[in-house]
Amino acid sequence: MKKSNKMGVLPILILLVLFSALIPVSVFASEGGIALNIRFFDKRIYYVEDDPIKIHITITNNTPTTYRFKLADERAFSLDFDVRTLSNKPLGTAEELTRKRTQYQQVYFREISIEAGESFSFTEDLRSYIKIAEPGDYVVKVKMYPELLRHDNISILASGVSAQTFESTGLSLSVRPPVIIGEDGIPVEMDTVTGSYLFREKLSPDKVVDYMLTARQKSQWVKFFLYLDLESLLKQDSEQLRKWNNETEEGRKQMIDAFKAELSNTTIDGTISVIPNEYTIERTQYTSFEATVSVMQVFKYPNYSELKRYTYFLHQKDGLWSIVNYSVSNQGTM
């Protein structure tokens, strides 16, 4: 009897082992398991051109035991990107990725061990995986292949049958149209409301300030930035100026992008991007290349209104005026 009991337990154990081997890896990627998170490595404005879109990928072990997986030296055999439009239409694969996966090669890898409560991160360029040919808003996801995507299962992937994977949550990506350079050498912006390109016009200094303030009241950010010389405004801060002088061209571009984001999010009194409820242009003075425009601005609060006088300083180049600096003085309340 004892012998027959042992023989009966053995097949059950074998079945349990086989069953556990068939459990998808995605089960372990659920909450409390292995988490796959993505974010932008250097969040900025992205265009249709081939500038990198770097995605920071983090794998976190939320289990009580060590988690091990294989990571290919050529990351195209360890992960994939799924990018879709807001209508759920997938984007096509980049030629570079197709070339890597279709040529026969040895896939070299290393085994990564992540201890309980720890994470492992790396960065990949989205454009190495996905072809982004049109401007628009997209949702980005990453798929990981812990046992690698080899030549013998790439055909399975192409057929639409899922290999062992786990997937990240979605990341919103906005891609803007190609940059068009205007006659003044400054990139032309697109009006997000009408979809048409915005060209800087030869407005007088007071009209430039009026255009900027009206755009800010309507939260039309593209128009708001159109006549601002962001480089000059940024360099008014001595610390930013020192950093600017030590930066590369790419670093300076990132500083401008960060400055635009800061202006877009600020609500601090006295900054150029705070919204006035009312404003009156008091006085405009200018020579051939320099101008000052004085504006009384009213900021309304529940129990009172605050008056501030903004003085905008403008420079003229090729017949086009730009705001390069400003000052603010308090004028009391009413």
Image: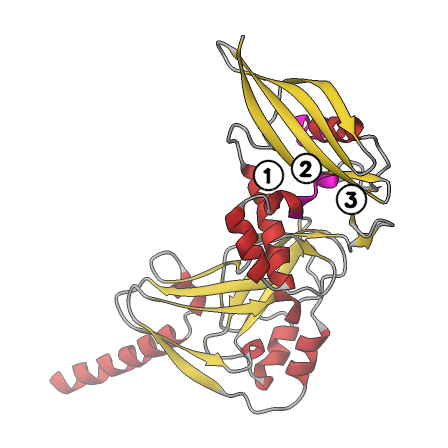
Three-letter amino acid code at the position of disc 1: Ser
Please tell me how crowded label 3 is: few (under 14), some (14-19), or many (20+) other residues with Cα within 10 Å: many
Three-letter amino acid code at the position of disc 3: Met
Q: Tell me: 21 left or right of 274.
A: left
Q: How is the image coloured?
A: secondary structure
Residue pictured at 68% horizontal, 59% vertical: 90
Q: Secondary structure at mark 3?
A: strand
Residue pictured at 50% horizontal, 55% vertical: 169
The answer to the question of whether label 1 and label 2 lie on touching residues, with beta carbons closer than 8 A, is: yes
Between 239 and 145, the one lying in front of the other is 239
Is residue 132 shown in magenta? no
The residue identified by callout 2 is 221
Label disc, if present, on residue 190 of the rendered structure? 3
Residue pictured at 51% horizontal, 82% vertical: 73
Please report the bounds of the magenta region as a residue range.
215-231
Q: Quadrant of the N terminus?
A: bottom left
Q: Quadrant of the C terminus?
A: top right
The residue identified by callout 1 is 264
